[in-house]
Amino acid sequence: MKQSAKRYSPMQVALIGGAIATTATLSVFGPGWCRSVRAALQDSPKQVVDQVWQLVNREYVDGSFNRQNWQTMRLSLLSKNYSSREEAYVAIREALQKLGDPYTRFMDPKQFEALTSQTSGEVSGIGIRMEVNETNKRLVVVEALENSPAIKAGIKPGDEIVAIDGKPTGQMKIEDASKLIRGRAGTMVTLRLERDGRSAFDLKLTRANIEVPTVRYELKQEGNRRIGYIRLREFSAHASDQMRRAIRDLNGKQVNGFVLDLRGNPGGLLQSSIEIARMWMNDGSIVRTVDRKGGSEVSKANHTALTNRPLVVLVDNNSASASEILAGALKDNKRAIVVGSKTFGKALVQSVHELADGSGVAITIAHYYTPKGTDINHKGIAPDIKLDLTQEQQRQLASNPNLLGTQNDPQYTRALTILSNNRLAQPLQNQTSQKPTSFGASDLRF
């Protein structure tokens, strides 16, 4: 996106639930932006206030602005004197709140940075996962990520982190330790480690940009069947590449069927959900989005499916946004059987903009529909086979995530029963080519 303010990096995205998806390029400032007004607002808190107003005025999905006089709102916003950016941020949030849409929201620079870091699928650090040892309350390394500075330096699971840049970690929270370890790529951090009862030693590491794994997969031998289990945590910028690798690897191991686990997945990038749907579907519609002018766009499969083996998708009430796009596409096209609890129910698309001072705004710009034209907003996707977990089962899986995708996971075991059904014993060749019900008008979404 061409930006008018020098400090921006080009960025504009659309959210699906809490996710982000690339959208068409737009200018931040409308054609009516007067040069004299722009000069008056330059480098003042009002600059960001009016940027937000302009973007909402141009993009917001509800042309009535929740029955608010949006022109009057601009006059009110610009008539005030803001002594600080924080004061301006409060005014922006109050104005956006009047739209009655929790997904149209303002983010201060730290919040915006956190969002972009999450959806980029990258972090700047050394590439470790940590947890607190319940026995001695010390920080311990759970995993060193592939190709990370940590794994190259020889950090191993079980290593205890006793200090970070000289600061003792006793009783330190994981969040606080993460803040100390993360930092700009190319900078240094020193960890003091203890391993297998040996004396503590220091390890100096150079931070780097690291791809965060969002896909976990494994081959499971379930009786006489080989099952490819894939868990997708979120739809980040790297999720589609990781999913492609997972499917291809499992294909090479001659799996009989797949279980795709979307439980707890809050969403992510729209384009990522479309790309992943195309890995499972040869043809058919994936999603339709409609903007405030009624303009719609349909995303379709493009004959690039990586597999036609039987597929079961697991969902729960925390599967949202891009998860619902993927589950809805696979369900409506009869490519998969969906098992679990009704999904979250968010069918709104947001675009995300970086503002002049590093803050950001997410604006709902469209509504989306499943291939059969279903509006799932506030309703969710009903699974083909409803299987709710008891509170005790939920607690057990939440406290021990390693039980997910095992015989201790009731929804996974139901998926195995489905995959062992004779009707699904062969690839879904006919089902992958089956077309969904057509729409009267084109559509689009996140």
Image (spheres, rainbow, N blue to C red):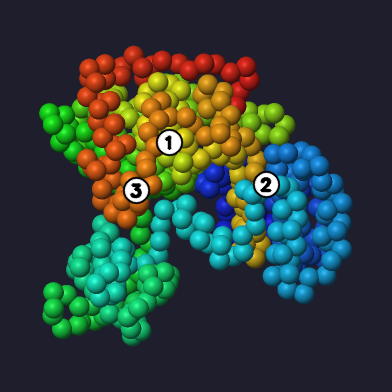
Amino acid found under the numbered disc labelled 2: Asp
Contact between marks 3 and 2 (CB within 8 A): the answer is no
Q: Quadrant of the C terminus?
A: top right
Could you say which is closer to the camera, residue 48 or residue 395?
395
Q: Position of residue 440 (x, y in %)?
A: 62, 17
User: Quadrant of residue 384 in the image?
Assistant: top left
Secondary structure beneath dot 1 equals loop
Number of residue marks? 3
Could you say which is closer to the camera, residue 183 or residue 142?
142
Foreground mark, 1 or 2, reads: 1
Which residue shows up at 64% across the image and 53% down it? 105
Asked if one can make out residue 301 in the rendered structure from this viewpoint, the answer is no
Q: CA distance from mark 3 to mark 2?
A: 34 Å
Question: For residue 209, which numbered disc appears in the image?
Answer: none
Q: Position of residue 186 (x, y in %)?
A: 38, 71
Q: Which of the two discs, 1 and 3, labels the residue nearer the N terminus?
A: 1
Q: CA distance from mark 1 to mark 2?
A: 25 Å
According to the image, label 1 marks what residue? 341
Label 1: few (<14), some (14–19) or many (≥20) C-alpha neighbours in 10 Å: many
- Outermost residue on the bottom side: it is 166
According to the image, label 3 marks what residue? 392
Could you say which is closer to the camera, residue 409 or residue 155?
409
Q: Which of the two discs, 3 and 2, labels the residue nearer the N terminus?
A: 2
Contact between marks 1 and 3 (CB within 8 A): the answer is no
Indicate whether 366 appears above or below 111.
above
Q: Position of residue 151 (x, y in %)?
A: 23, 64
Secondary structure beneath dot 3 equals helix
According to the image, label 2 marks what residue? 101
